[in-house]
Image (spheres, rainbow, N blue to C red):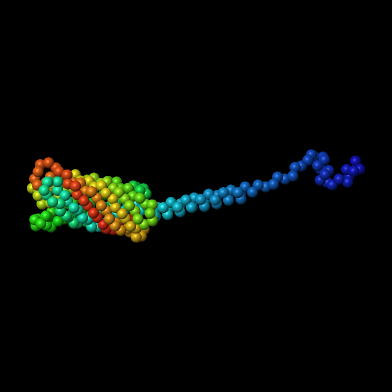
Amino acid sequence: MRHAAFLPEARRETRGRGAIPPPAPKLKSNGGIMKLRVVVSLLAFASLVGVAAEAQERHSVDVFAGYSYVRANPATSGTNGFSLNGGSASVAYNVNGWLSGVADFGGYHDTNILGSGVDGTLSTYLFGPRVSYHRFSRVTPFGEVLFGVAHTGANLLNTSNSQNAFAMTVGGGLDYRVSSRFSIRAAKVDYLLTRFNEFNTTNAQTQNNLRVSTGIVFRF
């Protein structure tokens, strides 16, 4: 009992009431949560910046306008081919990075068909898919298949009336990018098939024509 008198007050209370555990260390939960929020916010911001940059680089619509040459080849035996000059325009909606939907319109004219002094016109209205390859920094090759209708005046194939007929093209081209919104279509070459009556025949015949175009492309 004598020794108990010399115990510190805290020891005496411990013996009387039981051991008191030391206070638990405080967890820095608030700091950890804040750091996690900062990391998540930075990742989300980086993702948004990446998506915005990709959207700016990939334009939704391409508009082409330029010169077109058509080499018309009548199916009638003994009839020579002849040339038509004109222009074409197209609008392409880019579905994704490689696939587009295209609407193509063209008008072509010859003032002296086969030296006869007669002039004639040809118009085309075509629609279909385009596949583009964007792996190069400035050059974009593409291919397309278009279907639609062609219209010609009576003089072009020496018929009594103007005609509307089935038409299609298979071909491709090469675009050279000058800036993010402007490109030069260096060349576009198409096989142009038409199904007109020729020289007042009653059955449609197949004309295997060639079309070559060049011009400029605006991207929006």
Residue appearing at x 14%, y 56% in the figure: 110
Residue at the extreme bottom: 178
Residue at image position (25%, 47%) is 170
Q: Position of residue 104 (x, y in %)?
A: 25, 50
| Residue drawn at (14%, 48%) of the image | 74
Determine whether 16 is above or below 39 in the image. Answer: above
- Residue situated furthest front in the rendering: 78
Q: Is residue 182 above or below residue 40?
A: below
Q: Quadrant of the C terminus?
A: bottom left
Could you tell me how many numbered marks the image carries?
Answer: 0
Nearer to us in this view, 17 or 104: 104
Viewer can see residue 149:
no
Determine whether, in the image, residue 36 is placed left or right of residue 186.
Answer: right
Q: Quadrant of the N terminus?
A: top right
- Foreground residue among 92 and 2: 92
Q: Residue furthest right?
A: 2
Residue 158 on image: x %, y %: 9, 49
In which quarter of the view is residue 166 placed?
Answer: top left
User: Which one is in front, 172 or 87?
Assistant: 172
Residue at the spot 13% in from the left edge and 51% down from the top edge: 80
Any part of residue 202 in sight: yes
Of 146 and 136, nearer the camera is 136
Residue 169 placement, left or right of 137? left
Looking at the picture, how far across and down is residue 216, in whole percent? 28, 58
Rendered location of residue 188, percent (x, y): 27, 53
